Image (cartoon, rainbow, N blue to C red):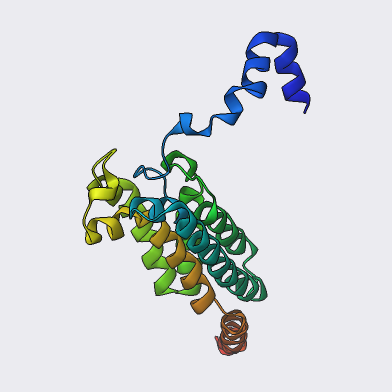
């Protein structure tokens, strides 16, 4: 609110134009079917569905992803990995948002780092894989397989690859929920505790 008031103070006419006229014209930022709109809504728009059917499927998809995220987040939190839980929530927001342009996906970098660190620490192959896949996704993005401004004309496999950001985010959430469990930490600590007495006894008997 303070920043908005400051904008009015510094640029009254521009602020008035934006808040009374421009803000209502959401089509100025581009169509939802553009390949850079990486979310459920964008994927549905690109396959040529009508507005009503698209809305119903989008709402249904959002609830399904919400259920997946809540389940994964609870398991990850019980396993003592709050940062990974935060990553799951951030990716959920990008997937279900009505508009998530490719430059909105700034959470990809921390997601890659967190999954790599947790994967290394827990010797978790699934997290290591999605971390590497995230790097590959940013280096060579498959969304370019969709012809710009003609995305709805692409064939089915281009459509699947064209929503690669969404698939990757879902893979991260699913991998976190399926493979990061609380028992792993306890077992690792137990193995470490078992090794420590042996090391101490070796030191004591050493001449």
From what the image shows, is residue 105 above or below residue 24?
below
| Quarter of the rendering containing residue 134 | bottom left
Q: Where residue 112 sits in the image (x, y, percent)? A: 45, 55
From what the image shows, is residue 85 above or below residue 203?
above
From what the image shows, is residue 55 above or below residue 170?
above
| Quarter of the rendering containing residue 24 | top right
Asked if one can make out residue 87 in the rendered structure from this viewpoint, the answer is: yes
| Quarter of the rendering containing residue 130 | bottom left
- Name the residue at 54% across, 51% down: 97
Could you tell me which quadrant the C terminus lies in? bottom right
Q: Nearer the viewer, residue 162 or 70?
A: 162
Q: Where residue 184 sits in the image (x, y, percent)? A: 56, 82
Asked if one can make out residue 141 in the rendered structure from this viewpoint, the answer is: no
Q: Where residue 10 sits in the image (x, y, percent)? A: 70, 9
Q: Where residue 172 sits in the image (x, y, percent)? A: 46, 65
Q: Nearer the viewer, residue 129 or 162?
A: 162
- Name the residue at 36% across, 42% down: 34
Task: Please tell me how many numbered marks the rendered image carries.
Answer: 0
- Name the residue at 78% across, 25% down: 2
Could you tell me which quadrant the N terminus lies in? top right
108 horizontally vs 155: left or right: right
Q: Nearer the viewer, residue 160 or 169?
A: 160
From what the image shows, is residue 191 above or below residue 40?
below
20 horizontally vs 29: left or right: right
């Amino acid at each position: 609110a303070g920043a908005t008031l400051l904008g009015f103070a510094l640029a009254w006419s521009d602020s008035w134009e934006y808040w009374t006229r421009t803000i209502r014209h959401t089509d100025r930022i581009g169509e939802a079917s553009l390949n850079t709109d990486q979310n459920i809504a964008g994927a549905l728009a690109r396959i040529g569905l009508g507005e009503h059917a698209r809305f119903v499927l989008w709402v249904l998809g959002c609830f399904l992803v919400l259920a997946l995220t809540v389940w994964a987040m609870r398991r990850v939190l019980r396993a003592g990995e709050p940062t990974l839980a935060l990553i799951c929530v951030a990716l959920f927001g990008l997937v279900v948002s009505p508009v998530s342009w490719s430059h909105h996906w700034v959470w990809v970098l921390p997601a890659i780092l967190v999954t790599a660190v947790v994967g290394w620490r827990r010797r978790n192959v699934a997290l290591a894989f999605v971390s590497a896949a995230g790097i590959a996704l940013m280096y060579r993005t498959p969304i370019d397989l969709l012809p710009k401004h003609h995305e709805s004309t692409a064939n089915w496999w281009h459509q699947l690859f064209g929503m690669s950001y969404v698939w990757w985010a879902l893979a991260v959430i699913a991998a976190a929920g399926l493979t990061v469990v609380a028992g792993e930490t306890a077992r690792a600590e137990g193995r470490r505790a078992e090794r420590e007495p042996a090391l101490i006894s070796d030191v004591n008997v050493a001449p």
